[in-house]
Amino acid sequence: MNLNSKIYIAGHRGMVGSAIWNALQKKGYTNLVGKTSRELDLRNQQAVEEFFKSEKVAIVIDAAARVGGILANNNYPYTFLMENMQIQNNLIDTALKQDVEKFIFLGSSCIYPKLASQPLKEECLLTSSLEPTNEWYAIAKISGVKSCQAIRKQFEKDFVSLMPTNLYGPNDNFDLQTSHVLPAMIRKFHEAKISGNQPVTLWGSGSPMREFLHVYDMADAVVYALENQLDEHLYNIGTGIDLTIKELAEQIQKTVGHQGEIIWDSSKPDGTPRKLMDVSKMKTKGWSAKISLQNGIASTYDWFLQNEHSFKEVKI
């Protein structure tokens, strides 16, 4: 891969996109392109086509998406379905039309069936029903995966999909109304600590098992996919290690230094019982995660403290 190749990172200001941008810069790539949502509305097909024609990018990394946790997915199903399809369809189709050399599509482990055998293999895609609390986002991402697969089959283009497990790290979303479980816990435990170690209420039973990947590892996987030939259309990206939500809460509580009670609200949904990725395919290709969950949580909490001033006050 030429270090001067023009690489467009869609969603370069987000947690994943910014990590990829920084990782590429550190590797010596000098011709990176990014546009904010105000500069380029990826939902607008004409605007996307005009951008591609003017920039003539060689490589596209699609890290742009509308994302959120269980609450956001439940409250805005049409938004999560339609906007994600608009974004990815415009990018994928235009990249094909403009003869882009390589396209890397980023999705989510939620594309796999709710009750699929664990760990989740790429082959279990579309074998049974999805988890209802995030099926809208999942269906959009599945359509992106299948679009890239179809392009590989019909046009023999280098379009590949990477499906990360639950991501976290610097530039994560800490808004308690829309965030995912790990950043939400960091904020809840922190605000409870500074309020006199008040009790923290968490959703569900704490029994579901989840796997977490630091966003810097995700960025490293994207760079690896960029610089190496991947023979198949779909690869899982994760650590291959999971833990219960209760264990996660206790680990974050310890890292933050909160000494109050944890209350589990079992009236709230748990989501998928378990979601562990089979990462053997990517490992066989030569890539594996490096950052431990303990070190990742600690560094993420440090980042949260440094940027706490930018978060709005939220009642616990």
Image (cartoon, rainbow, N blue to C red):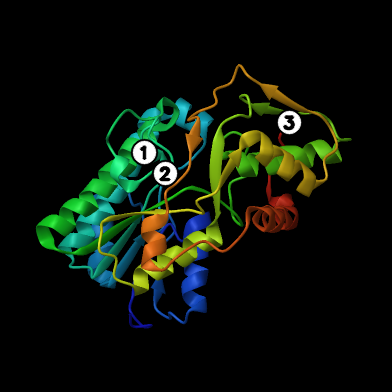
Q: What is the x, y in percent for residue 281?
A: 36, 58
Mark 2 near mark 3, Cβ–Cβ under 8 Å?
no
Residue placed at 25% from the left, 61% from the top?
159
Quadrant of the rendered structure where residue 286 is? bottom left
* Residue marked by disc 3: 315
- Ranked by sequence position, the earlier of labels 3 and 1 is 1
> In the figure, 241 relative to 137: above or below?
below
Is residue 262 shown left or right of residue 276? Answer: right
Q: What is the x, y in percent for residue 44?
A: 29, 49
Task: Look at the numbered disc 3 and give the secondary structure of its residue.
Answer: loop
Q: Which one is closest to the eye, mark 2 or mark 3? A: 2
Task: Look at the numbered disc 2 and give the secondary structure of its residue.
Answer: helix
| Disc sitting over residue 109 in the figure | 2
Q: What is the x, y in percent for residue 174?
A: 63, 44
Q: Amino acid at mark 2?
A: Ser
Residue placed at 61% from the left, 24% from the top?
204
Residue at the extreme top of the image, as rendered: 267
Q: Residues within 10 Å of mark 1 (few under 14, many from 20)?
A: many
- Of the 4 image quadrants, the one containing the N terminus is bottom left
Quote the CA–CA distance across marks 1 and 2. 6 Å
Mark 3 near mark 1, Cβ–Cβ under 8 Å?
no
Q: What is the x, y in percent for residue 206?
A: 63, 29
| Disc sitting over residue 112 in the figure | 1
Quote the CA–CA distance across marks 2 and 3. 31 Å
Q: Is residue 2 visible?
A: yes
Is residue 100 shown left or right of residue 3? Answer: left
Q: Which one is closest to the eye, mark 3 or mark 1? A: 1
Residue placed at 49% from the left, 57% from the top?
16
